[in-house]
Amino acid sequence: MKNIFDKIKNLSVLQDKTGRNVSLVASGVVFELIANGLSYLILTRIYSPQEFGFFASFLFVVILISVLSTLRYDWFIPSARTDSEAINIFFLCFILVSFSSIFLAVPIFELFIRIFGYSDINKLKEYRMLSPFYVFFGSLYQVANMWAIRKEYFLTIAKVKFYQSIVLILVSITLGLGGFGVKGLILANISSLFSGLIIFILSFLGKDKKKLKDIKLSYAISYAKQYFRLTFSSVGQSFVSTFAYQVVPFLVTTYFSPKFAGQYFLADRIINLPTIIVGQATFQVFWSEASHTKQENPEKLMSLFMNFFRRLLKISWIIVAIGILGPFTFEFIFGSKEWGEAGVVALILVPAAVFHFCIFPISPILIVLEHQHWLFLWDIFRLILIFFCFYLPSKLSWNPKYATLLYSLTMNFMYIILFFISMLVIKRAVKK
């Protein structure tokens, strides 16, 4: 496997730094995606839309808890001034995650169930004891990923993605055939996060073991105080952003049905394949390059921002093609009429998916330039609109597909606004 990734790294057509780094990360994601995509051919024949719906709702809650667990200090690892500062922020995150997983995960999970307990969401109670494991491994995995971005270990990130996918597929299928249902999907994801974290740790011990001597509790506390003002706004922004991005299956389960939530979950995964392959890889590389450009040559931030945007825009047609084919292919590919309906949902999601693909990967520019408050305000407004996109149609007895169309068009509009906000912030930063 090492030889495969080395060949990708050394391809002559990828010799510019940006192209090479994006391709390295994307290569791991491509392997992961191909494997996961093939696994859906099996998983949709083992798990029902209802089970996927409850699983998506579980993910919504634990991912929100994971955001709170680090207080988003991990965001400052890539742009820390020195490796000593970065490794102490890493250590600080480890302390926070450990505390959150042990003492906060289950109570917060139960709080969500009580708030929405009048609906089918109440059935999530039986999975609450799995939440600390997801929060611990998921949060530390994200922190380790931030260190890899800082050090530009994009080859390691690619390898992690590949091996995670193998674990996820094997455990999902095994537990599904064993009749574990929703628990099988949850345990498979926890296993995948654990395997990725272990690979990151082994890699860091080989490359950065000497950095561990710089870890001191007093330093970690000092950096916690130093970044507290910024992290206070960051954690609020990140919580609201994650809430907005993950809440749709949860709202659909609450206001419509777990079955449609499962269909939405599959449609969202398929229509966002380009974002998973290229967008997330570009997100990580852009964050790294923007952080370095800010320190070394801030006048080039606008050209960097627009260069990434144009590259993404050129290939966004793939999303449109996936959406058009959805209604005609999902039933055959995924094995039943219930999953065939997800193809129609995929087509409905095209407007939102296209602009998410083009603008989400370059949104870290606001974090790099320490303008998280703009993201925070944008996400609050977006979250309010998302809530009304599903709450009002449910009260008006609309078909959930119409509610999803309203959501898709609304998100299209919101991402265009984010694009222009980012450009304005860059222009002001360059003038300073």
Image: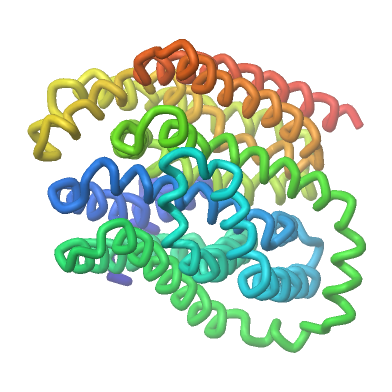
Q: Position of residue 408 (x, y in %)?
A: 46, 19
Judge whether 63 appears above or below 378 on screen.
Answer: below
Question: On the picture, is 206 further left or further right than 72?
Answer: left
The N terminus sits in image quarter: bottom left
Q: Nearer the viewer, residue 263 or 140?
A: 263
Q: Nearer the viewer, residue 131 or 330?
A: 131
Q: Using the image, determine if residue 37 lies above or below residue 331.
A: below
Q: Residue at x 46, y 11 (%)?
A: 396
Where's residue 100, x and y in %?
Answer: 67, 68
Q: Is residue 291 left or right of residue 397?
A: right
On screen, 122 above or below 82? above
Residue 263, placed above or below residue 65: above
The residue nearer to you, when weighing 173 against 423, is 173
Instruction: Choose between 38 and 127: the one closer to the eye.
Output: 127
* Horizontal relation, residue 250 to residue 342: left or right: right
Q: Is residue 258 visible?
A: yes
Picture residue at 91% right of the left edge, 64% below the top: 225
How has the structure been colored for display?
rainbow
Q: Which picture quadrant has residue 326?
A: top left
Which residue is drawn at the image coordinates 46% and 38% (left, top)?
119
